[in-house]
Each structure stands twice: as C-alpha cells, then as structure tokens.
Image (cartoon, rainbow, N blue to C red):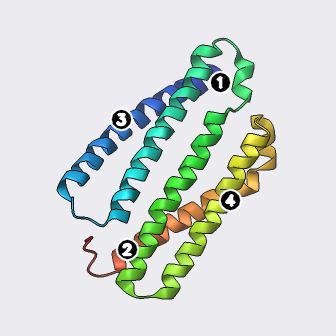
Amino acid sequence: MNLVFNILGGSFVGNLLTALCVGVLTIQTYSYYNAFPNDARPLKLAVGLLWALQVFQLACCTQTVYRWSVANHNNHSALEWGSWEFGMHQINTVCSSVTVQTFFAYRVYSLSASLYTGVLVQILVFLQFGFGAAVSVKTHMNQEFKVIVKECTWPIVSWLAIQVCLGHNLSVLVSNVHNLAFH
C-alpha cells in the first residue's frame, strides 16, 4: 500500500467514525433536552453550542475528504496543501475544548469552593486556546503541510500537551470533588 492510499483510507474511515459519533451525540442531545427541560439556560445553550460545533466539524471533515478523494482524484500534490475546512477543524476543536473545560472548571470551583483551583484551570484553558488558535491562524496563513509542520511544531506540541494536562487534571479534580450532582 502506498502513502496516498493510507492517508485517504484513514481520512475516510475517520470521517465515518466522526459521523457515527455525531449521530450518537445528536440522540444524546435530544434526550438531554427532553429529560431536563428545566435546566439553566446557559447550560442548555452550552449543550446546543457543542452539538452545533460537532455537526459543523463533521461537515468540515466531510468536505476535506471529498476534496482530497473525489475533487482531486489522482492529483497527489493536492494532499500537500490544507484548505479552509482543515483550518476550521482545528479552531472548532479548540472552541469545543474551551467550552467543555470552562464548564468543568466552573463545576469544580462551585463544588469545591476553591477559587485558586478554578482560576488555575481556567488560565490553562485560555493558554491552550491561545496555542490552538495560533496553530489555526498559521494554518490559514500558509497551508502547505511541510511548512506548517516545520514552523508550528512547538505550538502544536504545547497545545496538545496542555490539552492532555487539562483533561487529566479535570478528571482527577472532578473525581475528588464530593457531591457531583449536576442540577
């Protein structure tokens, strides 16, 4: 198997799995709105925003796979260049992460009554947003993958490292906070 086949095959399978996950998310979102009609408006808006972001991300992924697989069939040089959809995928991921992590930072703060913990987590959330947004902007400025990888290695690694640290720390904080009833 050649490299192009692997890239296109992986992109296609990834897009199918994304569509499956968005379908599950749609059912969960619908069930949430039916089961909890009296939840606070900001929480309901956050759930709706996250659902809309994921649907938009699926549309961007599908357009990217279509552009690489169908519109540029047998044009292997097209794989060397990103597109607006590819950049939007990155900023969409950053926005989704910020929304979810901010919610959990607030939740940890409100349940633990520790201002320092909530503020520290939120500072890390904004820091990862900055790195993620910088990578997305750089992707839009120069869309050749070789250049993006060469010039953006440290922001990409920093962004993903902060994402991992936040995910781990939020998991630990949420599991250690007592009485995690979501009202």
Give the Cα separation between the discs numbered 3 and 1: 26 Å
Circle 2 — which element? helix
Q: Quadrant of the C terminus?
A: bottom left
Instruction: Give the mark nearest the N terminus, 4 or 3.
Output: 3
Q: Which residue is under mark 4?
A: 131
Instruction: Residue 35: give x, y in percent of width and height.
Output: 18, 56
Q: Nearer the viewer, mark 2 or mark 1?
A: 2
Q: Which of marks 2 and 4 is in front?
A: 4
Q: Which residue lies furthest to the top in this view?
A: 74
Quarter assignment of residue 68: top right
Q: Is residue 104 above or below residue 78?
A: below
Instruction: Give the mark nearest the N terminus, 2 or 1.
Output: 1
Circle 4 — which element? helix
Q: Which residue is under mark 2?
A: 174
Q: Is residue 77 left or right of residue 9?
A: right
Q: Nearer the viewer, residue 29 or 153?
A: 29
Q: Which residue is under mark 1?
A: 3
Instruction: Residue 172: give x, y in percent of width and height.
Output: 41, 73
Instruction: Residue 41: give x, y in percent of width and height.
Output: 33, 63
Circle 1 — which element? helix
Give the Cα separation between the discs numbered 4 and 3: 29 Å
Instruction: Give the mark nearest the N terminus, 3 or 1.
Output: 1
Give the Cα separation between the discs numbered 2 and 1: 42 Å
Q: In this view, does 90 lie to the left or right of 104?
A: right
Query: What amino acid type is highlighted by mark number 4?
Result: Phe
Label 4 CA crowd tier, 10 Å (few <14, some 14–19, many 20+): many
Circle 3 — which element? helix
Give the Cα separation between the discs numbered 2 and 3: 28 Å
Label 2 CA crowd tier, 10 Å (few <14, some 14–19, many 20+): some
